[in-house]
Image: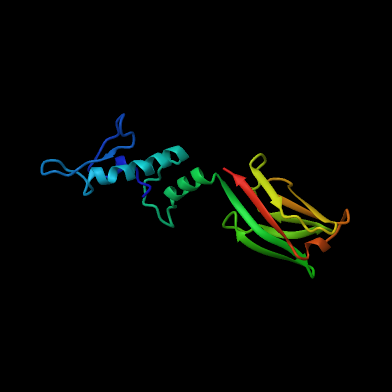
Amino acid sequence: MAIELQNKTNVNAPDSDFPYGDVRDKTPTVAGTKYDRNTMSDYFQFFHKMMDEAGITYNNVLDNDYSGFQLYEAFRKLTRPYKVYSARVGYSGGSMNVIEFEPISELPIVWAKSATGVFQGTLTGIFIVGKTWVDCSNFDAYGNDGRIGRVDNNIIEITSYASGVASDAPMTEGVFVEIKVYD
């Protein structure tokens, strides 16, 4: 439904009271919508205000999987102004073990070991400076520790330590990772 109300048939044009246009009642002499204004106007105004506040320009085609879901994107942007990635990232037996709970994009973050105790997650152009927040769970209470951080726009890096020395061992059980990229 990302078609502006003013571009629908038989509606009132925008004015100072209804900046997005308004539902017009149908009467015997006036062409109007099949909706009763008192029943439907608030709904139309709500969705148009949401699109306006989110700063999303109407594509003026019906919302769907092919054209995009603009109303949903406006809602998401206003209620959660960031994309989230959450996963359990581990390393054992020479392989990365990743369970994604919430992907950040259609493409997965590709995790790989880059050195002893160093593991990098790569996804091109996602981790923007000043807009990316990262965190990971504590490793354990036995001297195992870790750090996570943004390397550049493409890479997030986890470094794991056993008793203060870079080591793969703390990653055998995996750590929980959360990344937020703000709009």
Residue 121 image offset from top left, x and y in percent: 71, 55
Residue at the outermost front position: 141
The foreground one among 68 and 149 is 149
- The residue depicted at 45 percent of the width and 38 percent of the height is 53
- The residue depicted at 45 percent of the width and 50 percent of the height is 72
The foreground one among 138 and 114 is 138
Q: How is the rendered protein coloured?
A: rainbow
* 87 with respect to 183 (left or right): right
Label total for image: 0
- The residue depicted at 63 percent of the width and 61 percent of the height is 100
Residue 166 image offset from top left, x and y in percent: 86, 56
**In this view of the protein, can residue 101 be seen by the observer?**
yes
Residue 138 image offset from top left, x and y in percent: 75, 55
Looking at the picture, does residue 52 appear above or below residue 94?
above
The foreground one among 14 and 75 is 75
Residue 21 image offset from top left, x and y in percent: 30, 37
- The residue depicted at 42 percent of the width and 48 percent of the height is 71
